[in-house]
Amino acid sequence: MPLRLRPNDPTFYDLFTESANHLVEGSRILAELLGSTAGTGLSSSHQIAAQMKDAEHAADETTHSIIRRVNSTFVTPFDREDIYRLASDLDDVMDFMEEAVDTIHLFNLEKLPEEIAEQIEVLQRAAQLTAETMPRLRTMKDLAEYWIEINRLENTGDAVHRRLVAKLFSGEYEALTVMKLKTVVDLLEAAIDAFEHVANTVEQIAVKES
């Protein structure tokens, strides 16, 4: 087996953990918005949408820091292309969550289907797992349980999405409302799918480094 010399610089691992923590914050804001629509309406949706925009900008800055670090580092802890891919995958999750929040605000949706809470619960669990897993990239140990659990969560998200779409087309909602709500539901599903892309990249990295 060839000798692998991995740099001791923890910066990349810290930045990936920081990126994942942004997702934890994003999923928290999503849950806060859901609470506002389930309660007194969208009186605070503007403030919540602004919070999400700030969180998305902070996540972008972390992504840019990772890219700058790759471009200025001679020896990276694992393949450069994998670093780019993982940074991009994490950024995609935040982008979809931010777009969902912005869409709810722009469409003036005053009430969301209760099942959307299940989508957000999946996102919160996936975000927390990802934040807990990123530091383990340094040792490449105990990572399999991460992508297995993310895959399970993605399957759960798929089932919730199917139920939501069926409910939207059940005749309970007016046609225009269906179009608005389906846009939100699909964006949340895209965020869940993006977590699976993160997990797949982590698996690819672990296999290469094993």
Image: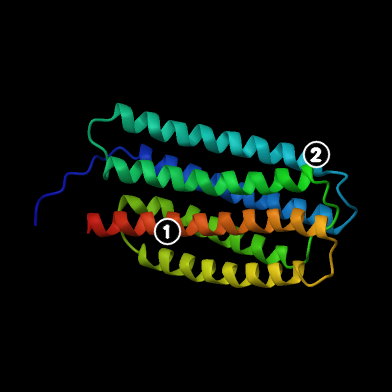
Nearer to me, 77 or 176: 176
Q: Are marks 1 and 2 in contact (CB under 8 Å)?
A: no
Of the image marks 1 and 2, the number of the one nearer the N terminus: 2
Residue 48, placed above or below residue 178: above
Nearer to me, 129 or 103: 103
What residue is shown with label 1?
199
Residue 40 x, y percent position in the rendering: 90, 53
| Disc 1 residue type (three-letter) | Ala
Helix, strand or loop at label 1? It is helix
Specify the label residue 46 is tagged with.
2
User: At x 54% / y 38%, what residue is drawn?
Assistant: 59
Label 1: few (<14), some or many (≥20) within 10 Å? many
Name, please, the residue furthest toward the front. Answer: 175
| Disc 2 residue type (three-letter) | His
Residue 124, placed above or below residue 52: below
Please count the marks in the image. 2
Q: Is residue 178 left or right of residue 193?
A: right
> Toward which corner of the image does residue 128 lie, by quadrant?
bottom right
Residue 105 x, y percent position in the rendering: 78, 44
Specify the label residue 175 is tagged with.
none
Q: Quadrant of the C terminus?
A: bottom left
Colour scheme in the image? rainbow
Residue 90 x, y percent position in the rendering: 48, 47
